[in-house]
Image (tube, rainbow, N blue to C red):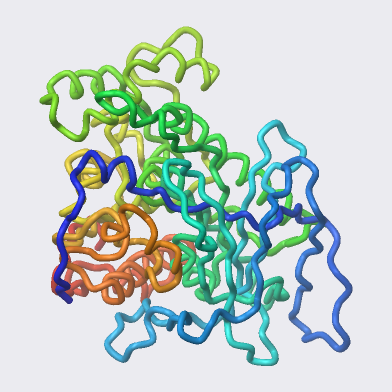
Amino acid sequence: MVQTGVRTVGPWLLLALLLSACQPSQAPVAVQATSIPAPTAPPATSVPAPTVAPATAVPAPTVAPATAVPAPAEAQTTPQGMRPDAPTYAVHGPFAVGYKPLVIGAGSKRPLQGSLWYPALNPSGRKEEITYTVTQKDSTWSTDLPKIVYGHALLNADVDAAKGPYPLVVWSPGFVASAAWNSNLLEHYASYGFIILSPEHIEGLYPSDFASTPMVISDFWKSSIDRPLDIKQTLDDAEKLTAPGGALAGLIDMKHVAVVGHSSGGYTALAMAGAQYDLAAFNARCAQLPKDDPNTLFCASLVPKEAEMAARAGLHPIPQGLWPSLGDPRVTAVIPMSSHSYLFDKAGLAKITIPMMAMQGSGDSAVSPAWGGKPAYDNASSAQKALVTFVGGEHLIFGTPCANEPWIVAHPAYGFFCFDPVWDKTRVLDLIDHFSTAFLLDTLKGDKAAHAALLPDAVTFPGIEYTTTMK
């Protein structure tokens, strides 16, 4: 399990580059209410893949869409969880996995490129393989290598309606990151009978963000407000998709909805669970930091923007005490991964009452566990909660293997992306799959076996520290 490696960049650079990843740039399409013609003699339980058409609300990027063309043989990777020693819920689930790009909130003031993964039909037994084409949201570096991510899904496959409706999992990527970067995880969830929707948050990283001392990420304060609104819009779209006449009519179980996310996406999950800003406590925490503490990046990016944040959230004047919740009652469970939770502090995190599983690496140099998963677990009021800690793990243990994204070798923080100081990538992704999938099966499907797998006596994996209220 232990892998040799070193942290080759300092905390400041890590924070600047922690998720300088990619944004899907498949030509965006809006899922329509009608379906494509059914194939001849379709299986009795099949639902044709939704018709897609070019959306006019978002300018279509000039790069190629996702394709089912196989990746070169040397670049193909094996899906996680196929090894005989893989934990129970790391093994590929019983469903084939389908994928399609779409537009979330087409026709609205803020349409978003998005991704949809789902349980699919695969009557001919095709190999699950796909190439996601992506583009950077980070303009601080460049490379001529094509921005692609190799995955394991069937492009535009028919939906398997046999066991629907399926609970919904909304994925929120990290800051300036993309769902494609975690596609291995989202494909895995779909294989267990979940529908996954992920919006591409509109945010960027620019050279000017690193010209000041301390550095200030200019879009960070905006995204802290915009991200929960993006998730609300995603939930609204899910309601339309599953409504009568929708492209997935009757197939999304909107009574069982989880928000899962990494880094800023984990923050987004906490906000959607009902955590409330406590900026007085946040400002007090920032005031006590030494000037060379890497967490001053968060303070410098957010503290001066308190008035702008309130205005962007439609709050006038700036709230005193806890801010109103940015959450949504449709969300019934959350999994924040390497999340930052400092904006909420103790009182704000106590407003979370739904089931929560926080996941973190104890060696995270981008979001200190003391500012992230641990206070979220300690202070949430949830009757069912868990904290999974990967001892020594860094911030990016949750991402797809670097073999799936060959362009990453040109990234200035390549070593940080691809080599954890402690964890072997295959093993850690197996464990992430196992814990998070079992939690989703338990909380969204009432799976008793999955619940049993999360009880304290069942968690005996080396390198894992586990705390839970589950009984």
Residue 73, how many percent across, how many down?
A: 51, 86
Residue 175, how many percent across, how many down?
A: 42, 43
Q: Name the quadrant containing residue 95.
A: bottom right
User: Which part of the image, by quadrant, shows the N terminus?
Assistant: bottom left
Left or right of 395 on screen, residue 130: right
Residue that lies at the very extreme toward the top in this rendered image: 317
Residue at image point 18% right, 57% down: 467
Residue at image point 47% right, 33% down: 223
Q: Name the quadrant containing residue 427.
A: bottom left
Label tally: 0
Left or right of 278 on screen, residue 274: right
Residue 376, how many percent across, how many down?
A: 26, 42
Residue 93, how many percent across, how many down?
A: 48, 80
Please determine whether, in this image, residue 66 is positioned above or below residue 319: below
Residue at image point 36% right, 42% down: 353
Q: As rendered, which of 9 and 118 lies closer to the eye?
A: 9
Q: As rendered, which of 304 and 145 lies closer to the eye?
A: 145
Please determine whether, in this image, residue 322 is positioned above or below residue 460: above
Left or right of 301 on screen, residue 288: left
Q: As rendered, which of 458 and 5 lies closer to the eye?
A: 5
Residue at image point 29% right, 62% down: 397
Residue that lies at the very extreme toward the front in this rendered image: 144
User: Which part of the image, by quadrant, shows the C terminus?
Assistant: bottom left
Q: Name the quadrant containing residue 117.
A: bottom right
